[in-house]
Amino acid sequence: MPEIEIPVGAATLPGSLVVPEGAPGVVLFAHGSGSSRHSPRNRRVADVLNGAGLATVLVDLLTEEEEQVDLRTRALRFDIGLLADRLVAITDWLVQQPATAGLAVGLFGASTGGAAALVAAARRPDAVRAVVSRGGRPDLAGAALPQVRAPTLLIVGGRDEVVLDLNRQAYEQLRCEKRLEVVPGATHLFDEPGTLDRVAELAAEWFSKYLVADPQAGSR
């Protein structure tokens, strides 16, 4: 994947961007607890999205220094405000870049990244057109949940019982077009055979449906 650097305030975050020819939208990945842009799960899903003609960008939401702090304290991975701020800044960056300007933006969040994606979607309703959460913690989005306007798909493993219950509670607070998909036999990390493939298939269907190129892009 082509490597990029994204300025976010005083920080510079490394990322990987793939833009298939004719892509109607770009999916920004918000990784989960203790993960990074090198996550094999997210890269696998990104490969499927690229195969469906969608652009993808995987970014480390924490700097190297912040990652070291988080490894010791496990605090920053639950700092939904910080993660959402980074996603908003990256979304703003994407709509200004020649390679992605005019593309509809989707957010794919895993674990705590699911909450950050929903908060960012609530803050950028005109830019973010769809959200998918994989084994996410949408409950941590709190008061932002009823403000989300982007169609939202929550994907949870059938054996991830605590997180499934939290997703059901958050689902009731969403006021947008929404769907809760339970993958039978899957635990939190979707390690079971075929379960991550199902996640990728569901995400590709959702984003392909809702990420439509901005008709105004050509006239800007």
Image (tube, helix red, strand yellow):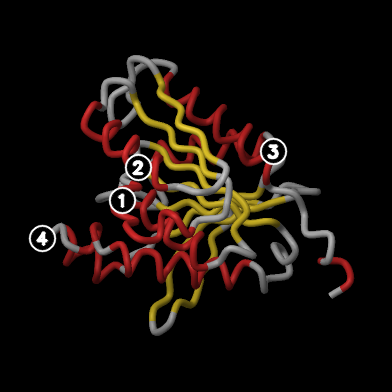
**Among the two numbered marks 4 and 2 on one chain, the one whose residue lies closer to the N terminus:** 4
Q: Tell me if residue 27 comes above or below residue 64 in the rendering.
A: above
Looking at the rendered structure, the number of numbered marks drawn on it comes to 4
Q: Residues within 10 Å of mark 1 (few under 14, many from 20)?
A: many
The residue that disc 1 covers is 112
The residue that disc 3 covers is 209
Q: In the rendered structure, which amino acid carries the disc numbered 3? A: Lys
Q: Residue furthest bottom?
A: 10
Helix, strand or loop status at disc 1: helix
Q: Tell me if residue 26 comes above or below residue 203 in the rendering.
A: below
* Tag 4 and tag 2, C-beta contact below 8 Å: no
Q: In the rendered structure, which amino acid carries the disc numbered 2? A: Gly
Using the numbered discs, state the Cα–Cα distance from disc 4 to disc 1 in whole angstroms.
17 Å
| Residue 106 coordinates in the image, percent (x, y) | 58, 52
Q: Residue at x 41, y 52 (%)?
A: 37
Helix, strand or loop status at disc 4: helix
Q: In the rendered structure, which amino acid carries the disc numbered 1? A: Thr
Q: Residue furthest right?
A: 219
Q: Nearer the viewer, residue 163 or 171?
A: 171
| Residue 198 coordinates in the image, percent (x, y) | 49, 23
The residue that disc 2 covers is 136
Using the numbered discs, state the Cα–Cα distance from disc 4 to disc 2 in whole angstroms.
22 Å
* Tag 3 and tag 4, C-beta contact below 8 Å: no
